[in-house]
Image (spheres, rainbow, N blue to C red):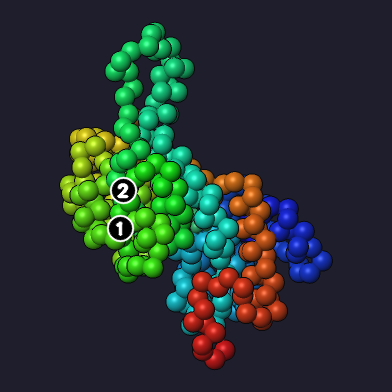
Amino acid sequence: MTRRIPDIGLEMLSGQVEIDLWEGELPPPYEVLKERIQNAQGLLCLLTDRVDRELIESAPHLRVISQYAVGVDNIDLETATRRGIPVGHTPGVLTDATADFTWALLMSAARRVTEADTYTRKGNWKTWGPSILLGMDVSHATLGIIGFGRIGQAVARRARGFDMRVLYTDTKRIPEIEETLGVEYASLETVLREADFITLHVPLTQSTYHLIGEREFSLMKKDAILINTARGGVVDPDALYHALKTRQIRSAAIDVTEPEPIPMDSPLLELPNLIITPHIASASVQSRNQMAVMAVQNLIAGLKRERLPFCANPQVYNQQW
Ligand code: DGY
């Protein structure tokens, strides 16, 4: 287990398995992890652990990988599948927390909450003024959602209270929920051109890596605001810097960066029109507890060679092991 998870998960494991727990506050170094999983049948890992081909192939007894997260882009799923190792993850239980946080970022960027807080603390609040810290209206604006899975849909549901026009794009259209959610399907290009707020909810894969780059920023409105609670790698950081610095778009709020953590000499940190939070969109007590329960359920099932309740590579069960 590469990090201490909430007690509710540890209690479920107690007495059932022998645990080798990495107690460090930072992730175990790659070589240490590689060495320590030599004799392990199960691995409970975090998105901060690189579980690549070399690591998986070096663990002869591994039966299950259980990720304490929904995203599994840090794990080589192909190798795990080829080796007959199911990979567990935690979908669903962080959908609301992540959608809520997306809105927290969206509202903060729209109404410049973090800038206003800094302004106040610095003693700049001398009087009320007609044009101090003006932001953008959220109500009646157009919201563009890129990636319309569980989290994208939960974000759309919340937009109804703001009477927004909601455009979504994804690799496939989902006509059956368009009317219920009050959303319209559009091409990526249309979303980029027409949305006032653009929010990203795609997994990080080869085809979404740097999905938002120079060209995409050039299509956005001058007052567009970009929100990223998905994965840092979905946005090209140099293009983001350029777009914000030259005011090609108005502002952005990101909970994820490439790399993570963001290096302290990153030029992005100098931009006043960018909010950066440390990958906390799912960080509510309830979500993190439920993630622990699911991760442990997956781990135990895998150790018993039972089907994982929440499996990220179900194709593993269609092959002989
Ligand atoms: C995930 O689960 O993939 C989030 O990024 C962290 O909760």
Image marks 1 and 2: residues in contact by CB distance under 8 Å: yes
For the question of whether residue 263 can be seen, the reply is no
From the viewer's side, name the closer residue of 234 and 54: 234
Q: Earlier in the sequence, mark 1 or mark 2?
A: 2
The secondary element bearing badge 2 is classed as strand
**276 sits left or right of 297 in the view:** left
Percent position (x, y) of residue 272? 33, 29
* Residue 184, disc: 1
Percent position (x, y) of residue 255? 44, 45
Percent position (x, y) of residue 228? 38, 48
Residue under the point 43% across and 29% down: 114
Gap in Å between the C-alphas at discs 1 and 2? 8 Å
The secondary element bearing badge 1 is classed as strand
Residue on which the image places disc 2:
165
For the question of whether residue 306 can be seen, the reply is yes
- Near mark 1 (Cα within 10 A), the count class, few <14, some 14-19 or many ≥20, is some
Residue under the point 17% across and 47% down: 218
Does 85 sit above or below residue 158? Answer: below
Amino acid, disc 1: Glu
